[in-house]
């Protein structure tokens, strides 16, 4: 459902558009004289985070990971941000719960709004991004717990059931990395822009944005470790499956090797083409042949065991 919400602070306003229609976005661009390319970016899904700097405002696109419990996928949630001296404008698709919760805090708490009486839009932007980045860490912990569960299952004899689980977790780690890969560069460009532009008072808040850069580094390092770990688990799982498969093939090979001479003997004695065939005319000839077959099988098994093939 489309909605527009506005919060008024002493020095600036925060306008949020949730699931806006194309006409609403176009009207917003005309009212604030935003660049047409920025409006186009707001009308279609973006595949990467970015920041564009203009003389009187800054436009940023941030993608953040969201876990879909039904499909077990990590999907990108997009937030489009316009920021200048006297406004912060956000456009979202209502798919990032932490964003809505943060906005609602200001809607219902006048004390919280009053705390921003002497603050600037970029300070509010920092608080918003800080909440969202902190929201990412529990997902990383969840992925780590999934790796722990997979590792335990692999070495408990459930490696076949872990093939699909490993692929799901590896896909989620890859998607998580793809979503957050450029966050550090975008934030560094934002810091540089806020410092240089006369429209912002970044000198008071630069240390806060530096902490966001640290978050991006920490998130990326954790994802790198998870990537290496899930790849190692996948290799271990494949090795376990290959080992069990080779054991099965070894047993089948031994059975076929033992069966071959026994089958050959049975075939020879079943020809009935020679009257002088051993044991044919004897009363217990059948049991003699069976004993011969059994002896050959036992001797071969003993040889295989001595060589350590069993």
Image (cartoon, rainbow, N blue to C red):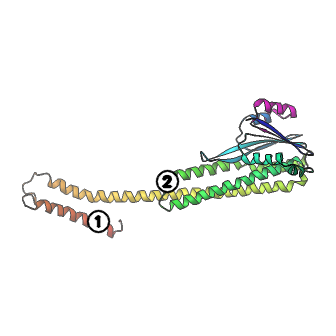
Whether residue 72 is in magenta: the answer is no
- Taking the spot 76% from the left edge, 36% from the top edge, the residue there is 42
- Taking the spot 54% from the left edge, 61% from the top edge, the residue there is 152
Whether residue 31 is in magenta: the answer is yes
Query: Would you name the residue on which mark 2 appears?
Result: 161
**Spatial CA span between label 2 and label 1:** 34 Å
172 and 117: which is toward the camera: 117
Q: Nearer the viewer, mark 2 or mark 1?
A: 2
> In the image, 201: left or right of 170?
right
Which one is earlier in the sequence, the residue at label 2 or at label 1?
Answer: 2
Quarter of the image where the C terminus is located: bottom left
- Pointer 2 local density, CA inside 10 Å: few below 14, some 14–19, many at least 20: few
Instruction: Please identify the residue farthest to the bottom as the structure is shown.
Output: 306
- Taking the spot 51% from the left edge, 52% from the top edge, the residue there is 163
At mark 2, the secondary structure is: loop
- The part of the image, by quadrant, that contains residue 20 is top right
User: Measured from the top left, where is residue 101 in percent x and y?
Assistant: 76, 48
User: Measured from the top left, where is residue 77 in percent x and y?
Assistant: 71, 44
Mark seen at residue 132 = none
Q: Across the whole image, how many numbered discs are drawn on residues?
A: 2
> In the image, 278: left or right of 309?
left
Give the magenta part as a residue range: 16-37
Quarter of the image where the N terminus is located: top right
> In the image, 278: left or right of 9?
left
- The part of the image, by quadrant, that contains residue 289 is bottom left
70 and 271: which is toward the camera: 70
Query: Would you name the residue on which mark 1 appears?
Result: 301
Q: Are marks 2 and 1 in contact (CB under 8 Å)?
A: no
């Amino acid at each position: 459902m489309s909605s527009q919400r506005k919060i008024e602070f002493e020095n600036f306003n925060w306008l949020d558009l949730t699931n806006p229609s194309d006409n609403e976005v176009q009207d917003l661009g005309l009212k604030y004289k935003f660049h047409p390319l920025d409006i186009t970016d707001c009308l279609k899904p973006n595949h990467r985070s970015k920041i564009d700097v203009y003389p009187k405002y800054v436009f940023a696109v941030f993608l953040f990971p969201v876990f879909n419990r039904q499909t077990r996928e990590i999907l990108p949630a997009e937030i489009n941000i316009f920021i200048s001296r006297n406004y912060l404008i956000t456009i979202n698709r209502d798919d990032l719960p932490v964003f809505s919760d943060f906005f609602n805090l200001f809607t219902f708490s006048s004390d919280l709004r009053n705390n921003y009486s002497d603050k600037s839009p970029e300070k509010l932007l920092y608080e918003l991004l800080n909440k969202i980045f902190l929201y990412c860490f529990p997902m990383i912990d969840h992925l780590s717990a999934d790796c722990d569960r997979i590792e335990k299952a692999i070495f408990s004899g459930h490696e076949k059931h872990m093939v699909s689980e490993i692929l799901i977790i590896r896909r989620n780690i890859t998607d998580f990395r793809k979503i957050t890969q450029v966050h550090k560069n975008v934030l560094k460009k934002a810091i540089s822009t806020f410092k240089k532009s006369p429209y912002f008072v970044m000198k008071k808040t630069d240390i806060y944005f530096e902490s966001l850069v640290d978050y991006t580094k920490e998130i990326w390092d954790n994802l790198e470790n998870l990537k290496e770990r899930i790849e190692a688990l996948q290799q271990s799982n494949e090795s376990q499956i290959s080992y069990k498969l080779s054991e099965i093939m070894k047993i089948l090979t031994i059975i076929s090797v033992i069966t071959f001479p026994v089958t050959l003997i049975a075939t020879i004695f079943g020809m009935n083409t020679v009257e002088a065939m051993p044991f044919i005319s004897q009363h217990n000839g059948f049991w003699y042949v069976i004993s011969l077959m059994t002896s050959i099988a036992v001797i071969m098994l003993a040889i295989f065991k001595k060589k350590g093939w069993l």
